[in-house]
Image (cartoon, rainbow, N blue to C red):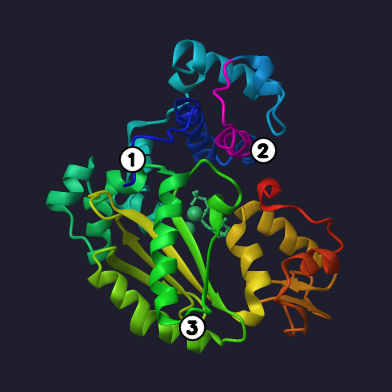
Amino acid sequence: KFEPSTNKNPNGRTIEVLQQMLDYYTRTADQWRVLAYRKAINALRRQPQRVVTRSQALSIPGIGTRLADKIEEIVLTNHLRRLDNASGTPEDLIIQEFLGVYGAGLAQASQWVAQGYRSLEDLREKAPLTKNQRIGVDHYHDFAQRIPRKEVEAHGDIVRKAVQQVDSEMQVIIGGSYRRGALDSGDIDVLITKPGASLEQIRSMMMDVAIPQLFSDSFLQVSLAISRQEGSKWHGASALPGSRVWRRIDLLFVPGAEIGAALIYFTGNDIFNRSMRLLASKKHMCLNQKGLYADVLRTTQRIKLNPGRLLEGRDERRIFTLLGVPWRPPEQRIC
Ligand code: DCP
Ligand code: MG
Ligand code: MN
């Protein structure tokens, strides 16, 4: 049986404090610091040992002197002085809290504050909420918790079993931060594919059989959204048998011929993806979650004028090669 108390991230508290600084710099649109903090947090998440001193921190690629000092200060004092005058106005803090509600963006969070709501309690009791917003509020604390690597795996195993019961040739791959080697993840990202199968085939196996089965097994708890490009992504929540904690889970349905491009997309991280796509566009190519395309014409604003010619979709490594980028294992795809 799964033990939820094991696998705590040894740098959890440090990451939590750095995340508050990152939130602050995100609000002030300080792009440069946002990148530095993201990089440091990503690097820390993958450290199996607790990082205590400045020099330990400095020895980690992606952490510079200023962040190393801050890490040491957090470990020594359990706090960061810089945060005291960086936390913003009380409204900023409430907006920050409301941004954690599933599906709520900056516009919605600010609107709730403008309407006078000051806490999750207010939202729960007084605000008119959509069905998904209500789930986001009711399960706020579940969704805010990081998911230990072992538990991500356990969710993936349950999905794999159900999917392969429908068709033993279907493949289930955990992507996202898990595939990048993170010790804990914000959600569970799962690619579902089958060699030779079309999107429609995979979609109907999932929507008509596997997903209803996972609901009746009481593994899936709710469907939150079916989004993007002909419904290839399914958002919802799942819980392990015997656990009352809901986790966010994303399923991506991938035709066999597109698995390489989909793996790159769904492994991320988002900034790595952005830089790969920018590089492709500079080479008159286009990289998206379906494939790498050549001979793409763009306006000076980089708006695509034609879809181009498919170079590769199936082979993840070959997409790197065709782009002229040395292969990077998932663990190194952080920016
Ligand atoms: N993605 C992207 N651009 C975005 C959002 C996501 O390219 N704006 C891609 C890269 C991500 C992947 O989708 O790695 C999964 O998205 P998540 O939001 O689940 O992010 P991660 O799995 O990377 O991190 P977390 O542990 O927070 O879930
Ligand atoms: Mg994820
Ligand atoms: Mn996700």
Would you name the residue on which mark 3 appears?
Answer: 202
- Whole-angstrom CA distance, mark 2 to mark 3, is 41 Å
| Of marks 2 and 3, the one in the foreground | 3
Task: Indicate the position of residue 226 as horizontal and vertical percent values.
Answer: 40, 74
Q: Mark 2 falls on what kind of element?
A: helix
Q: Amino acid at mark 3?
A: Ile
- Considering only vertical position in the picture, is 121 above or below 253? above
The circle drawn on residue 4 is 1
Viewer-closest of 50 and 129: 50
Q: Is residue 29 above or below residue 227?
A: above
User: Cα distance, mark 2 to mark 1?
Assistant: 36 Å
Q: Is residue 187 visible?
A: no
Residue 293 lies left or right of residue 63; in this view the side is: right
The residue that label 2 is drawn on is: 32
The residue at the point 53 percent across, 35 percent down is 22
What kind of residue is marked 2? Trp
Instruction: Please state the horizontal and vertical placement of residue 292, each as a whole percent of the image.
Output: 75, 74
Q: Earlier in the sequence, mark 1 or mark 3?
A: 1
Locate the C terminus by quadrant: top right
Q: Quadrant of residue 78?
A: top left
Does dot 1 land on a helix, a strand or a loop? loop
13, above or below 142, in the image: above
Q: Amino acid at mark 1?
A: Pro
Is 42 included in the stretch rendered in magenta?
Answer: yes
Between discs 2 and 1, the one toward the N terminus? 1
Pointer 1 local density, CA inside 10 Å: few below 14, some 14–19, many at least 20: few
Question: Is the residue marked 3 within 8 Å of ligand 1, measured from its CB?
Answer: no
x%, y% of residue 99? 37, 48
The magenta segment is 38-52
